[in-house]
């Protein structure tokens, strides 16, 4: 990984540019498969103005980044830390690769590793948690590669496309992340 705390092997995490990125996020929102993998709620459609208004309201409560490919600076996804509890030093992470052509190519895993490094070394967090749907096996495998462990499962908690599915909770502690870093050096 690069010396820059927000740069990995394939991607860098960059601040959102509301003028430019609201349109892009709105386009990704129109992809029903992206919505299905990203959200537990019903699919929603937001125009660029609505996306901008959301971020203007929420931007101070989250660490939100666009995922940008190093190869060509193309923005291909989003990642954020939210729900940060500064007393317990815990946070939730969310990620989505909006450009389908880059699914399953390691960009999400690289972005997650970069975000974890940032969370544990810059923000001094102690724990990062996420949830994933049981049908999202690509996401589940990516999170495992990043060091997350399955910590719990709510069987049949969600209804997606007329089928019941499990909601899986995964987490990683700073000590576990540090151990992984020592193994790769």
Image (cartoon, rainbow, N blue to C red):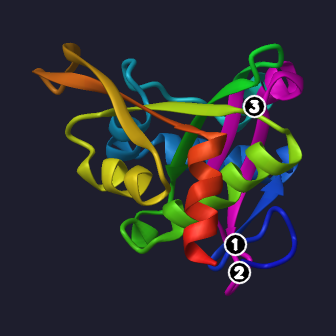
In the rendered image, the vertical position of residue 31 relative to residue 6, given as above or below: above
Q: In which quarter of the image is the C terminus?
A: bottom right
* Magenta stretch contains residue 70: yes
The residue sitting at 70% across, 84% down in the picture is 72
Task: Name which of mark 3 and mark 2 comes first in the sequence.
Answer: 3
Above/below status of 150 relative to 145: above
Does 157 appear above or below 93? above
* Mark 3 residue crowding within 10 angstroms, few (<14) / some (14–19) / many (20+): few
Cβ atoms under marks 1 and 2 closer than 8 Å: yes
Quarter of the picture holding the N terminus: bottom right
Q: In this view, does 121 lie to the left or right of 185?
A: right
Mark 3–mark 1 Cα distance, whole angstroms, equals: 31 Å
* CA neighbours of label 1 inside 10 A, class few (<14), some (14 to 19), many (20+): many
So how many labels did they put on this image?
3
Q: Badge 2 is on which residue?
A: 70
Q: How far apart are marks 3 and 2 (CA)?
A: 28 Å
* Residue 37 location, quadrant: top left
Expressed as whole percent of the image width and height from the top left, the position of residue 118 reads 78, 51
Mark 1 lies on residue: 8
User: Distance of mark 1 from mark 2, alpha carbons?
Assistant: 9 Å
Which of the two residues, 64 or 121, is positioned nearer the viewer here?
121
Q: Is mark 2 on a helix, strand or loop?
A: loop
Compared across the picture, whether 33 is left or right of 179 comes to: left
Q: What residue is at 59 percent from the left and 29 percent from the top?
A: 46
Element on which disc 1 rests = loop
Q: Name the residue under label 3.
A: 49
Q: Where is residue 137 in the image (x, y as percent from the top left)?
A: 24, 50
Horizontal and vertical percent position of residue 183: 55, 70
Q: Which residue is at the front of the view, 172 or 164?
A: 172
User: Which mark is first along the chain, 1 or 3?
Assistant: 1
Q: Is residue 31 left or right of residue 7?
A: left
The part of the chain drawn in magenta is: 55-82
């Amino acid at each position: 990984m690069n010396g820059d705390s927000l740069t990995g092997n394939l991607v860098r995490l960059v601040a959102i540019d509301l003028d430019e990125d609201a349109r892009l996020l709105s386009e990704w929102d129109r992809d029903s498969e992206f919505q299905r993998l990203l959200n537990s709620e019903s699919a929603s459609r937001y125009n660029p103005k609505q996306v901008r208004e959301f971020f203007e309201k929420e931007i101070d409560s989250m660490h939100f980044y666009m995922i940008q490919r190093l190869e060509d600076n193309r923005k291909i996804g989003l990642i954020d830390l939210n729900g940060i509890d500064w007393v317990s030093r815990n946070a939730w992470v969310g990620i989505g690769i909006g450009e389908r052509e880059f699914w399953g190519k390691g960009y999400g895993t690289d972005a997650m590793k970069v975000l974890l490094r940032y969370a544990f070394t810059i923000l001094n967090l102690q724990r990062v948690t996420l949830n994933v749907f049981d049908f999202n096996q690509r996401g589940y495998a990516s999170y495992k590669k990043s060091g997350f462990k399955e910590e719990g499962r709510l069987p049949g908690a969600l209804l997606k496309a007329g089928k019941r599915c499990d909601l899986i909770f995964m987490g990683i502690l700073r000590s576990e992340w540090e151990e992984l870093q020592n193994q790769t050096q």
